[in-house]
Structure formats: C-alpha cells, structure tokens
Image: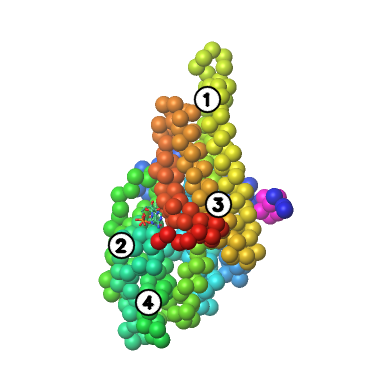
Amino acid sequence: MNFDLTPEQDQLRDAVRALGRRYGHSYFVEKAKTGGHTSELWSEAGRLGYLGVNIPTEYGGGGGGITELALVCEELAAAGCPLLLLVVSPAIAATVINKHGTDEQRKRHLPGLADGTQKIVFAITEPEAGSNFHRLGTVARRDGDDWLLSGRKCYISGVDEAQYVLVVARTEDASTGKLKPALFIVPTDAPGLTRSKLDMEILSPENQFLLYLDDVRLPADALVGESLDAGLPALFAGLNPERITVAAMGAGTGRYAIERASEYTATRKVWGGRSIGSHQGVAHPLAHAAVQVELARLMIHKAATLYDAGRDLEAGISGNMAKYAAGEAAALAVDTAVQALGGAGMTTEYGVATLLGAVRAGRIAPVSREMILNFVAQHVLGQDKSY
Ligand SMILES: Cc1cc2nc3c(=O)[nH]c(=O)nc-3n(C[C@H](O)[C@H](O)[C@H](O)COP(=O)(O)OP(=O)(O)OC[C@H]3O[C@@H](n4cnc5c(N)ncnc54)[C@H](O)[C@@H]3O)c2cc1C
C-alpha cells in the first residue's frame, strides 16, 4: 500500500495549488455574484495543461489518469474555486470520447478539451425520470443517415459556456425493438435545442439549465462510437471518473473551509487572552470535520488508483463510497466552519457561507447519497434491490 504521490503528481498538486490561490475564493464569488464565468482561471489552467492531465499525450493531454485529474479538482477547490465543469468536461466527456468515441471524434474533441478551448457538458437527468435512468424519455430516431433527438433534460450544468453537450438518449434496437441508451455529441447552438436557466440557491459562476430538444437534427457521426452497441459502455465509462472527481472537489472544499475556520479560531480572542480555538466546543467539531475530510481523501485516492489500474468494478464501489464520504464531509466541514466563525461565518468577506449551497447540492448531485446507499446495500451487502 502506497500513500505517496509520485514526484510528478506532487509537482502537479503544488502547481495547481499555486494557480488556485492566485485566483482564490473572492474571484470565484465575484464571478458568481456578477453573473460571470471563471473563464480566466479555466483558460490558464488549460494553457498550463491541468485540464487535460487525463487525456492521452497524442491529443495534447498529459497522459495521466483520474488520479491526476482528481488532484486538479481537489486543489482548485481547496483554493476556494470548486469548478463543477471539471467534472463534466474533462472527467466525463473526455473519458467517454477517449474510451468509446471514433478516431474522428477523438481528433475533433480531445485536443480542445485538453487545452480548455472546448467544453463539453453532460445531459442525462430528466424531469420525469430523475434518479431512475431506466425511464429516460429522450429519444433518438433515424431519419436517413441523420438522427433526430427529442426530449427534455434538467439541471444541466454549464450549457451557456459549452460548445457541445453530450446527451444521453434512447434508440430503438432494430433486432429486439427495445430501447437502449446512446450518447450524442450535440452542438449547443444546434437548431431545435433551446434552454432556460434555472434559478438555483447555489452561489456559483456555473449555471444549471433546462434543455428542450425538439427534433434536433444531427449527422450520423454525432453518435458516440461506431455503433449503437457503444451506448451502454460509453455511459458507464463516465460514471467512475464523475464520482471520483466530484468527491475530490468536495474534499478540497472541506479542506478550504476548515483552513479558513482554523486560521480564524486560532487568533480570535473574546475571553481575555485565550483564542476561541482553545475551547474544545469550537476546536473539536473542526477536528472532527478534518478527520471526515481526510477519510474521504483516502477513499478518493483508493478509488482513483483502482480506476487508473483498470479495475473498474472495484473502482465503482470505492468511487461511490468516496463520493458519499466526501459529500457528507464537505457539508459538515462548511457548516462547522460557519459556526466556528460566528457572525463572520455568515459574511461574504470570510468566504465560507458562500459554499453552503454548493456543498448541500453535493449530497444530491451528480448521484444522491440515497442512491449510493442503495448501490452499497445491493452490491456490497448483498441486499435485494428495493426499487
Ligand atoms: C447543482 C446541480 C448540478 C447538476 N448538474 C447536472 C448535469 O450537469 N447533468 C445532469 O445530467 N444532471 C445534473 N444534475 C442533476 C442531478 O444529477 C440530479 O438532481 C440527481 O441525480 C437526483 O435526481 P433528481 O433531482 O431528479 O431527484 P429524484 O430522483 O426526484 O429524487 C428525489 C429524492 O428521492 C431520493 N430517491 C429517489 N429514488 C430513491 C430510491 N430508489 N431510494 C431511496 N431514495 C431515493 C433521492 O435520493 C432524492 O433525495 C445536477 C443537479 C444539481 C443540484
């Protein structure tokens, strides 16, 4: 068992940390409050190669794995910049296209994803289907060589910033007549694709949208992979990277909040010469949160290592556990930090309450804590499926 990063990974961590700190949480908050995007940070991270760490070198990436991408997600979040689009664009979209796309799709998309000039967001959630992806109602029909996509998607992050959206739809299997999933790379300006922004109680420069697909016409090569059989494996390919990187983002956010609070409680004095952190009622909850965050980080490291070793099934279990642990730990850490800061905790200036919405959402998305518990109960504990 090896808990050490390689020298290259250590260097990457330090470099991303330095970049994140140069921007910092006030930059993130300012963009969110003024309706802007973190474009400068994204572009710089792309230019420096951090967005493409998991993309093969032949497409301009770093040739690393999800371990490296998780480091990027964690360190930017630990600097107060939790970028959700890292989870959808380089983690999900790049993995799906690299593993299951055609050569042509790899050449068209991976270089831009690697240097950050191209963003591809991900649309699976639907209003009626919710957590039950077997009920997806977005349908792809053939029309000559083209495809026509119709349906609705909800909570889709970053559509306003992206050139493409990877849409999960269903097609009719010619041999069985059954519907099966297929992924399509859809330009965000395709005729028939419209969106409306959702008002979310999350302070973030990244927005969520309702998407309406009304007979969106796509060429044959918009389908990910060579044939319809690529759909299901392509969909599953995105899941582990998604869970591991979103967990890393949660762990980084937890670290950020605990660091902010610890700096404050170590120096704030309201009872004579003693810091408020000397009171165990203040220090213990912070220490408890720090333990939870560190445990989540261990599980993230394990999941990423298994994933990069090609051990997908084991990575699925660890990745789900890591996502669960990090989601809970991040929410605990931010809430505890707010409490430890007292009134200052609720100000924008101290930059912790600004994360309350985001960490709360991290217990729901991209997969809810309940669906992870269902997964663990079924696949680890051997319980019958309840739904
Ligand atoms: C900030 C944010 C960003 C998002 N970004 C994206 C995105 O980019 N792309 C995308 O496709 N989706 C995105 N989503 C959607 C997200 O993945 C879903 O919200 C999530 O999967 C839950 O689905 P739902 O909201 O429909 O909840 P529902 O399925 O309606 O569930 C409601 C509640 O019931 C619980 N529940 C449901 N079924 C069961 C069961 N069988 N057992 C126990 N409990 C159950 C759930 O855990 C949840 O607590 C985003 C959501 C948020 C909040």
Front position in the image: 109 or 269: 269
| Mark 1 residue element | helix
Does 221 sit above or below residue 251?
below
Residue receiving disc 2: 128
Q: Distance between the residues labelled 2 and 4?
A: 17 Å
Residue 101 bears which disc, if any? none
Pick whichever of labels 3 and 2 is earlier in the sequence. Answer: 2
> Which residue is rendered at x = 49% and y = 33% of the image?
337
| Mark 4 residue element | strand
> Which residue is rendered at x = 59% and y = 65% of the image?
312
Task: Look at label 3 and name its amino acid.
Answer: Ala
Pick whichever of labels 1 and 4 is earlier in the sequence. Answer: 4
Residue 162 in picture, x, y percent from top left: 40, 62
Residue receiving disc 4: 179
Residue 93 seen from this side: yes
Pick whichever of labels 1 and 3 is earlier in the sequence. Answer: 1
The answer to whether residue 223 is left or right of residue 213 is: right
- Quarter containing ligand 1? bottom left
User: How many other residues sit within 10 Å of disc 4, few (<14), some (14-19) or many (≥20)?
Assistant: some
Pick whichever of labels 1 and 2 is earlier in the sequence. Answer: 2
Residue 110 in picture, x, y percent from top left: 52, 68
| Discs 1, 2 touching: Cβ within 8 Å | no
Residue 322 bears which disc, if any? 3
Q: Does the magenta portion include 116?
A: no
Task: Look at label 4 and name its amino acid.
Answer: Leu
Front position in the image: 294 or 370: 370
Residue 281 bears which disc, if any? 1
Q: Distance between the residues labelled 1 and 2?
A: 45 Å
Task: Look at label 1 and name its amino acid.
Answer: Gly
User: How many other residues sit within 10 Å of disc 3, few (<14), some (14-19) or many (≥20)?
Assistant: many
Task: Look at label 2 and name its amino acid.
Answer: Glu
Q: What span is in magenta?
A: 4-10
